[in-house]
Amino acid sequence: EKLVTGPEAADMVDLRLPVKQNLHLIAKAKGKKINQLNVCVLDRPRHSGLVDEIRQAGARTRFIMDGDVAGGIAAAREASSVDVLMGTGGTPEGIVTACAIRAIGGVIQGRLAPTDDEERQAAIDAGHDIDTVLSTNDLVTSDNCYFAATGITDGDLLRGVRYHGDRVTTQSIVMRAKSGTVRVVEAEHRARKWSSYTRE
């Protein structure tokens, strides 16, 4: 279970609070009305109850089809149309998102959400407290981390690969937590050279 938002509301939200209360806190911190909030949610049947709560609170939902890393980063970035990401998703994606959050600011909070008794027991046997809410600093304990991604298909975070005859252009983003540096890299590749190089 995850909640990601930007620096304005980072010290106010709490995953243990009801959805509506967190949305009101985020709206207040961002100087918006609740009906101006965009909540990013992974489009899965398991989120139907969450979506109902978001809509009953008056906020808007923005669905993503796959993976919540880009949605989490969008929720933390100031120039984004996404105000918060909510819902359940993969643990590895949560860790990757936390690396980016260490660079750009904001907060990710997560809590284990076992899907059945077997997963629940496995987590307990591994020494995890499934009720503990973990924050950004719990998920990534050092500023000595980086986030890097290259767009394959078009998305909110990055533009996808473009083909122009023998040229291929890509867009990548690289974030360094220690310095808070975010670089967007526009790269041009020669298709013939690139394809022979990537086959080696």
Image (spheres, grey):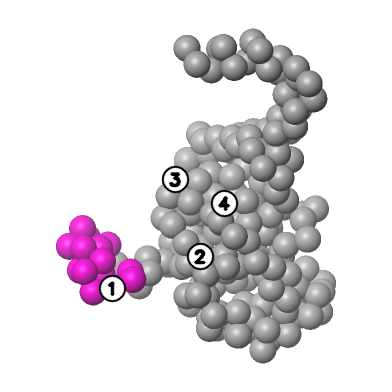
- Disc 3 versus disc 1: nearer the observer: 1
Q: Position of residue 151 (x, y in %)?
A: 66, 38
Q: Dot 1: few (<14), some (14–19), or many (≥20) neighbours within 10 Å?
A: few
Q: Position of residue 190 (x, y in %)?
A: 71, 14
85 relative to 100, above or below: below
Q: Marks 4 and 1, how far apart in space?
A: 24 Å
- Tell me what residue is drawn at x 72 percent, y 62 percent: 82
Q: Label 3 amino acid?
A: Thr
The part of the image, by quadrant, that contains residue 32 is: bottom right
Q: Earlier in the sequence, mark 3 or mark 1?
A: 1
Spot the residue most to the front.
165
Q: Label 4 amino acid?
A: Val
Check disc 4 and report its element: helix, strand or loop: helix
The part of the image, by quadrant, that contains residue 131 is: bottom left
Q: Label 2 amino acid?
A: Lys
Residue under pointer 3: 141
Residue under pointer 2: 2
Q: Marks 3 and 4, how far apart in space?
A: 19 Å
Q: Marks 1 and 2, how far apart in space?
A: 18 Å
Residue under pointer 1: 116
- Tell me what residue is drawn at x 63 percent, y 56 percent: 71
Give the label on residue 69, or none. Answer: 4
The magenta stretch is: 114-128
Queried whether the magenta region covers residue 116, the answer comes back as yes
Q: Earlier in the sequence, mark 4 or mark 1?
A: 4
Q: Is residue 26 visible?
A: no
Q: Marks 3 and 2, how far apart in space?
A: 18 Å
